[in-house]
Amino acid sequence: MSFTQEIQKRRTFAIIAHPDAGKTTLTEKLLLFGGAIQTAGAVKSNKIDVATKSDWMEIEKQRGISVATSVMGFEYKDIKINLLDTPGHQDFAEDTYRTLTAVDSVIMVIDCVKGVEIQTEKLMEVCRMRNTPVICFINKLDREGRDPYDLLDEVEEKLNIQVRPLSWPIGMGKSFKGVYNLYEKKLNLFTPSQRKLSDEREEFEDLTDERLDSILGNSYADQLREDVELIEGVYPDFDTKDYLEGKVAPVFFGSAVNNFGVNEMLDTFIRIAPAPKSRLTESREVTPEEKNFSGFIFKIHANMDPNHRNRIAFLRICSGRFERNKPYNHVRGPKPLRFSNVTSFMAQDKEIIDEAFPGDIVGLYDTGNLKIGDTITDGEEMTFKGIPSFSPEIFREVINKDAMKTKQMEKGLKQLMEEGVAQLFTFDMGSRRVVGTVGQLQFEVIQFRLKNEYNATVEFAPMNLYKACWIQSKDKKQLDEFVRSKNRHIARDKDGKLVFMAETKSWLQMVQDNYPEIEFHFTSEF
Ligand code: G4P
């Protein structure tokens, strides 16, 4: 197979959803279709139960599960699909945001009873930053859910994206009959079953066909005719180009647990979802077809064994062919790196591989050289953009409780931050260190891992902060003046970038009004 064919056959994506919408269930069904697993129940939910969320074993278990299912590769109809898992618990949202930088498209699962939920909105904002194409799967149609028109309106409104239904539900809950595929003009009747692998479909070129009445009954048949007429009248024809540009999300209805509508969506997915796309570096655009290898690290996972500090770094290949044992340029680092232990993630087994192609994700064993956001190339000095840090939502000051172990604490903190567990900000005044996270859970994780893996003891003191804003200005003098006058609130992020630590929303607004020349950003990349 030629290099170009290898690229064209790859689809790298993630499933995003508010917890409980059905991400794990859908993942499992996709793996069943791909032959990557044989039985239902093989994919473990990576959720942490709220009731057990401060149970350490549970967190450790979660880390174990999420390594095993971080990337799931499988083949379906000659397409190589790389499905990237995202953590179920919202306290790990930052991890999800970063994973989204490594995919070319997403499937978004929405619960038809609950509609668009908060976590979905946040994830969609991240997708919009890169115009990531989105396919929407409205799940749990076997339950009495909301009116499908209302759901579509809500998606458009809350997620700020146009929708185009490609299938339409007939009934819902107890009276759910199935879906009509508007694109293929086929009727797919619902039979609850967890094992069924293919949907049998009846073709209906013309919905006035009386067969429809005999299959669905008069009232459902008439309702469907009415709905289809309305949809075709209201929504413009589906345009793949608009989808690829992130402007329109095609919508499917189904029931993941009953394996209904999943096959239809997957067939459409492999037809329309983008093959690996070009990516921007700070200096130029890199196309996947370029001969020279390049890629970036978007996730680092510490080894479970505290006696060995080995970590697995997840590399997204952006261009060229990646080869085992070849020396590569680690753009940020002092020396070239050579990787002898390179794993792919086909099915649920990790296996050592010799080469990989654009769109692929490989795991690199690392002894502490790599950090999130690092670029690796054949030699070119460039850095991929689009792996930003987002402003945390909870901030606490780190208090070292054991002065004898300061060195260990420093090292541990540095390594945990490189793994992306949380963000560290150091205030210019007094060198106070502040850890910022999106959830409470990370503080417990950090405290526990510092003790367990580095033998350091820390506590966290609450801090009243609203947001960390990365600041810049075209006017250097103004920026210097701002930093001087607000020096009690100025800190540096892990890369030494200037950050303004705002205490409240209203105060931030006031400062922004008073300093119009200063730009305030909620992400580290702008
Ligand atoms: P998540 O990964 O997005 O958090 O969701 P997950 O797949 O774990 O699904 C959450 C719950 O919703 C599960 O029930 C799952 O069985 C159920 N579910 C998924 N798809 C459908 C569907 O199409 N219809 C219905 N009615 N339910 C669905 P649970 O009770 O939490 O767990 P379980 O014991 O059933 O596995």
Image (cartoon, rainbow, N blue to C red):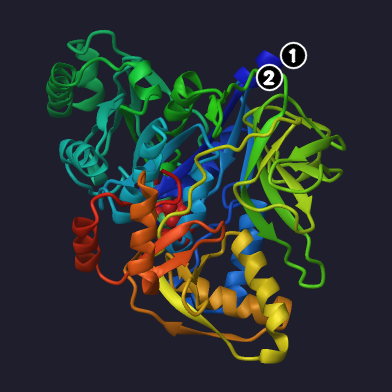
Residue in front for this viewpoint, 311 or 494: 494
Residue in front for this viewpoint, 186 or 21: 21
Above or below, 510 against 329 in this view is below
Residue in front for this viewpoint, 294 or 259: 294
Mark 1 is surrounded, within 10 Å at the Cα level, by few (under 14), some (14 to 19) or many (20 or more) other residues, namely: few
Q: Position of residue 420 (x, y in %)?
A: 57, 59
Q: Residue most toward the front? A: 477
Label 2: which residue?
Answer: 6
**Residue visible at 54% across and 59% down in the picture:** 496
Q: Are marks 1 and 2 in contact (CB under 8 Å)?
A: yes
Q: Which mark is residue 494?
A: none
Residue 394 vs residue 214: left or right?
A: right
Q: Quadrant of the N terminus?
A: top right
Q: Secondary structure at mark 1?
A: loop
The three-letter code of the residue at mark 2 reads Glu
Label 1: which residue?
Answer: 1
The three-letter code of the residue at mark 1 reads Met
Residue in front for this viewpoint, 192 or 429: 429
**Residue visible at 72% across and 46% down in the picture:** 363
Q: Position of residue 38 (x, y in %)?
A: 65, 42
Mark 2 is surrounded, within 10 Å at the Cα level, by few (under 14), some (14 to 19) or many (20 or more) other residues, namely: some
Any part of residue 498 in sight:
yes
Above or below, 170 against 488 in this view is above
Residue 118 vs residue 266: left or right?
A: left
Point out the tag, 1 or 2, that comes first from the N-terminus: 1
Residue 151 vs residue 195: left or right?
A: left
**Residue visible at 41% across and 43% down in the picture:** 526
Q: Position of residue 12 (x, y in %)?
A: 56, 33
Ligand 1 within 8 angstroms of badge 1 C-beta = no
